[in-house]
Image (cartoon, rainbow, N blue to C red):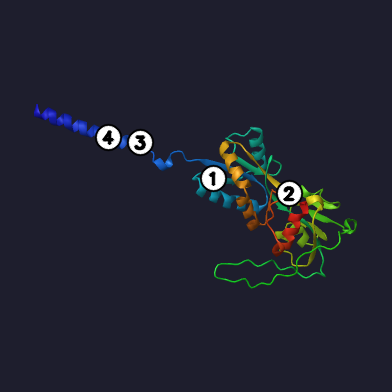
């Protein structure tokens, strides 16, 4: 009888040990209810992605959500918009041509002028170092140029009809540096890379400000979109050479005269 009791106790103990090791581990409280927000970006301007990455990091700190940002192909973006994609759509899509305004990219007409001094980019401060460069003259335009006298204007595809005489090229800056034409439609950041002098002009009726839009596919995406449209988020666009979707929100001053000129062109 004693031997049977010992055997039964041993079997019971073995069962308890097996139950302990085979039972699934409890889910940690911090792992429960984690909100994941997915952003798909379809835009060839690297600055847009950099701003979104910065804002995603801020949003994660503010809300505790997890934000995933990835580039999407035009085919993926179109499939998500039409509901024909294989997987779930993103929470937020960012690209040109959607419903909600998010930010603007800015372009101006740059005409090569070797009689002008080369414009040195405005220096930026760095940790433990003081800026030493002296900025060159501001790119203030003269009278409106005679477009008929310009033999060619290099332009990105989405600005091919912005002015008469535009030629669509994949990389206007590279073609302009290669001497393919005397003028090009460039961003202020691209103009700062030019090794020669130039004259800068805005496009009529704010045509040089190209809107990048967004569309939410979920409540989480809508909440993030509202956060990105707020003034505090829009103010950070100036760190990446971009412009606010709100025409009343001015980001640039005389310290960055070319961007200020582009920004004011939509008044």
261 left or right, relative to 84: right
Q: Real-space Cα distance between discs 2 and 4?
A: 65 Å
Which mark is nearer the camera, 1 or 4? Answer: 1
As drawn, the label of residue 39 is none
**Residue 121 in which image quadrant:** bottom right
Q: Nearer the viewer, residue 71 or 47?
A: 47
Q: Is tag 1's residue or tag 4's residue first in the polypeptide sequence?
A: 4
Q: Real-space Cα distance between discs 3 and 4?
A: 12 Å
As drawn, the label of residue 67 is 1
The local secondary structure at tag 4 comes to helix
For mark 1, does the 10 Å Cα neighbourhood hold few (<14), some (14 to 19), or many (20 or more) residues?
Answer: many
Q: Is tag 2's residue or tag 4's residue first in the polypeptide sequence?
A: 4
Q: x and y percent of residue 144 in the render?
A: 86, 59
Please say if 77 is above or below 191: above
Q: Real-space Cα distance between discs 2 and 3?
A: 53 Å
For mark 4, does the 10 Å Cα neighbourhood hold few (<14), some (14 to 19), or many (20 or more) residues?
Answer: few
Please say if 46 is above or below 20: below
Q: x and y percent of residue 160 in the render?
A: 80, 49
The local secondary structure at tag 2 comes to strand
Q: Nearer the viewer, residue 191 or 171?
A: 191
Q: Nearer the viewer, residue 17 or 43?
A: 43
The residue indicated by pointer 4 is: 18
The residue indicated by pointer 3 is: 24
Which mark is nearer the camera, 3 or 4? Answer: 3
44 left or right, relative to 111: left
Q: Are marks 3 and 4 in contact (CB under 8 Å)?
A: no
Q: Is tag 3's residue or tag 1's residue first in the polypeptide sequence?
A: 3
| Number of numbered callouts drawn | 4
Q: Real-space Cα distance between discs 1 and 4?
A: 40 Å
């Amino acid at each position: 009888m004693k031997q049977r009791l010992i055997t039964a106790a041993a079997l019971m103990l073995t069962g308890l040990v097996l139950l302990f090791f085979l039972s699934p581990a409890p889910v940690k409280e911090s792992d429960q209810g984690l909100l994941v927000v997915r952003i798909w970006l379809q835009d060839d301007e690297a600055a847009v992605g950099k701003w979104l990455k910065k804002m995603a990091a801020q949003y994660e700190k503010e809300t505790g959500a997890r934000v995933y940002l990835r580039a999407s192909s035009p085919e993926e973006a179109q499939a998500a918009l039409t509901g024909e994609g294989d997987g779930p759509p993103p929470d937020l899509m960012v690209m040109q041509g959607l419903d909600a305004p998010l930010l603007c990219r800015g372009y101006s007409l740059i005409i090569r002028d070797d009689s002008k001094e080369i414009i040195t980019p405005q220096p930026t401060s760095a940790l433990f170092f003081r800026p030493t460069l002296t900025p060159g003259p501001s790119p203030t335009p003269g009278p409106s140029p005679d477009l008929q006298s310009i033999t060619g204007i290099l332009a990105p595809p989405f600005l091919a009809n912005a002015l008469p005489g535009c030629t669509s090229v994949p990389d206007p800056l590279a073609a302009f540096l290669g001497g393919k034409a005397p003028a090009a439609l460039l961003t202020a950041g691209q103009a700062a890379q030019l090794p020669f002098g130039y004259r800068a002009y805005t496009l009529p009726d704010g045509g040089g400000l190209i809107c990048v839009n967004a569309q939410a596919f979920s409540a989480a995406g809508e909440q993030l979109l509202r956060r990105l449209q707020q003034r505090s988020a829009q103010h950070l666009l100036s760190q990446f050479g971009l412009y606010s979707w709100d025409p009343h929100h001015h980001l640039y001053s005389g310290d960055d005269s070319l961007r200020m000129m582009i920004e004011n062109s939509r008044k």
